[in-house]
Amino acid sequence: MINLEKYKDRYQLTKYIILFLVILFFWYGYGLEYGDKLYTIMLSMLIIAISMINWNFIEKIHFLKKIVLYMSSIAYEFFLAQFFVWKIAGEILLLIGIDGNKSRIIVSFMVCMFLASVLHYGFTKPVGRYIKKKIWADI
């Protein structure tokens, strides 16, 4: 029997539940397919447990907070940039002369971040300012 008295903090207990669910999910869910009921139940339990975590520790770490805010502001542009990354990253890797899985991941992530930033600051922000100035000013 688990002694819940030492887990007075709900979030500490949640961390152990998530660890248990992740282990269970990857141990038993390895051979399962997406449509299986057990897979769906385990994934649902994992999502619910993750949603119970207190994420306020991010606010205490100023640098991490800035990274999270920046990444969330360019999330859609990051998604769009993925369509163009592989060809550009492949050309960069040929130019450098390095080829490997880790180098492909690192170079493609850096290229994707660069493209997402260019899209965000070169297109999305100016269009947003224009819409605020012209369209919303009349209302």
Image (spheres, grey):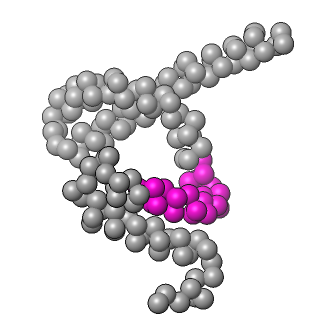
Position of residue 25 relative to residue 91, above or below, is below
Magenta-drawn stretch contains 82: no
Quarter of the C terminus within the rendering: top right
Q: Position of residue 15 (x, y in %)?
A: 50, 71
Q: Residue at x 60, y 60 (%)?
A: 55
Asked whether residue 114 appears in the rendered view, the answer is no
Q: Viewer-proximal residue, 63 or 131? A: 131
Q: Residue at x 15, y 39 (%)?
A: 99
Closer to the camera, 76 or 97? Answer: 76
Range of magenta residues: 43-66
Task: Kindly identify the residue that appears in the image at 65 percent across and 57 percent down.
Answer: 59
- Asked if residue 103 lies left or right of residue 40, the reply is left
Task: Name the quadrant containing residue 85.
Answer: top left
Q: Give the dominant element type of the magenta stretch: helix, strand or loop.
A: helix
The picture places residue 87, in percent across and down from the top left corner, at 25, 24
In the displayed structure, 120 sits above or below 12; it is above
Queried whether the magenta region covers residue 48, the answer comes back as: yes
Indicate the position of residue 18 as horizontal and vertical percent values.
45, 67
